[in-house]
Amino acid sequence: MQLNLKSPLVFFDLETTGIDIVKDRIIEISYVKVFPNGKEETKTMRINPGIPIPPASTAIHGITDEDVKDCPKFKEVAKNLAAQIEGCDLAGYNSNRFDIPLLAEEFLRAGVDIDLTRRRFIDVQTIFHKMEQRTLSAAYKFYCNKNLENAHTAAADTMATYEVLKAQLDRYPELKNDVKFLSDFSCFTNNVDFAGRMVYNDKGEEVFNFGKYKGRLVQEVFKIDPSYYAWMMNNDFPLNTKQKLTEIKLRSFNAK
């Protein structure tokens, strides 16, 4: 099924040094940019993360320190990458929970100002899990009747994710061929920050989604425990989380 798009949709996948959004880094990114007219552009690039790649990670994606030693740092490609995805919606597999938060962190570390919150996000894994509860390889076999060769390489996983979404639209008539619908359907929570440390309640207010203040209004916590802001800012929370936290705090000051 041809995707019904109003804006370009970028399917992407990251290979990384690990799964810690704060501490780990991108070592490979691959994307398929699908235009409303059906045209497709693909690109894969490797990144020197600036930190050692753990053997456990290499065992999954096969990329070693030697493979990326002469590759550019993310900061060197960040502006060009941001330009490529500017005005595009984003799609991936487990992307809402991992790839998008990590990509946002890398852009912030590189000092590149790109507002990803203005885009729609489609997480094909979420759609799959709501419908069938399986893995990407199983999804590819189930929906496309193909074996996923070279699994855990960014290029193979990206293209498989793109094909799976189109097959999902063919299989489930209740899924609308519309980016907003698919974005809403594949979203578990209404996150304030990409990592989901804060979410919006049913009144559109920011509340904490973890720890001792889970479910409490962020602005309310700032009033009863002013040190909580400093604690979060001085600990290993994602830069995007700290950015949103600061925006809320500044808004509280301006409202006085």
Image: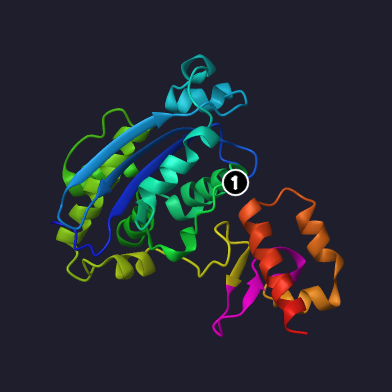
Above-or-below relation of 209 to 136? below
* Left or right of residue 101, residue 45 in this image: left
* Rendered location of residue 183, percent (x, y): 36, 65
Res 150 → quadrant: top left
Residue bounds of the magenta highlight: 200-214
Q: Nearer the viewer, residue 108 or 237?
A: 108
Above-or-below relation of 184 to 235? below
Evaluate whether residue 133 shows in this view. no
Q: Quadrant of the N terminus?
A: bottom left
Q: Which residue is mark 1?
A: 111
Q: Quadrant of the C terminus?
A: bottom right
Res 252 → quadrant: bottom right
Res 88 → quadrant: bottom left
Above-or-below relation of 252 to 157? below
Above-or-below relation of 4 to 102? below
Q: Amino acid at mark 1?
A: Gly
Evaluate whether residue 5 shows in this view. yes
* Rendered location of residue 137, percent (x, y): 30, 40
Q: Is residue 252 magenta?
A: no
* Rendered location of residue 83, percent (x, y): 40, 47
* Rendered location of residue 38, percent (x, y): 15, 52
Q: Is residue 213 magenta?
A: yes
* Left or right of residue 121, residue 248 in this image: right
Q: Residues within 10 Å of mark 1 (few under 14, many from 20)?
A: few
- Residue at 52% over, 28% down: 57
Q: Nearer the viewer, residue 3 or 146?
A: 3
* Left or right of residue 186, residue 252 in this image: right
Q: Nearer the viewer, residue 88 or 225?
A: 88
- Residue at 44% over, 39% down: 14
